[in-house]
Amino acid sequence: MVTTTPISGAPRLRANLGLRLAAIGAHRWRVVDAAGLIVGHIDEFRTARGIRYRALRYHAGSRAFRELGAFWSLDDAVDCLRYAR
């Protein structure tokens, strides 16, 4: 059996902005607001220069995720989703 673990362990946000992360995979989290609505998704991935976080939002019309940006900080990726609402 093959298991995977997140690259950087359990993610923690720097401040409680009414958002929480729900793990949906080894390297992916769903960003959920206080009302339980999905704000977007965060992917964690490794590059030659370190760990990055990709902010994604689902686009119903195309039935696909659209990348909003890649960030060096988890908090920056979450802020991108929060401000792009």
Image (cartoon, grey):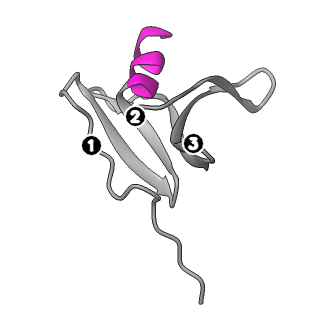
Count of marks, rendered view:
3
Q: Residues within 10 Å of mark 3 (few under 14, many from 20)?
A: few
Query: Which residue ends up furthest to the left in the rendered image?
Result: 16
Which residues are drawn in magenta?
A: 76-85
Mark carried by residue 49: 3
Q: Earlier in the sequence, mark 3 or mark 1?
A: 1
Marks 2/1 in contact by CB < 8 Å: the verdict is: yes
Q: Amino acid at mark 1?
A: Arg
Q: Return the x and y of residue 58 as percentages of the image width and height.
A: 64, 28
- 30 is higher (above) or lower (below) than 68: below
- 73 is higher (above) or lower (below) than 22: above
Q: Residues within 10 Å of mark 1 (few under 14, many from 20)?
A: few
Q: Secondary structure at mark 2?
A: helix
Query: Which residue ends up furthest to the front in the rendered image?
Result: 49
**Distance in Å between CA atoms under marks 2 and 1:** 8 Å
Write the residue at 52% across / 58% down: 25
Mark carried by residue 12: 1
Q: Which residue is mark 2?
A: 74
Using the image as rendered, state which of residue 14 and residue 36 is in the foreground: 14
Write the residue at 26% across / 35% down: 13
Q: Secondary structure at mark 1?
A: loop
Q: Return the x and y of residue 28 as percentages of the image width and height.
A: 52, 49
Write the residue at 47% across / 32% down: 72
Using the image as rendered, state which of residue 54 and residue 73 is in the foreground: 73
Instruction: Locate residue 2 relative to residue 61 in the image: left or right.
Output: left
Q: Earlier in the sequence, mark 2 or mark 1?
A: 1
Q: Secondary structure at mark 3?
A: loop
Q: Amino acid at mark 3?
A: Arg
**Residue 48 part of the magenta segment:** no
**Residue 82 part of the magenta segment:** yes
Q: Amino acid at mark 2?
A: Leu
Write the residue at 47% across / 20% down: 81
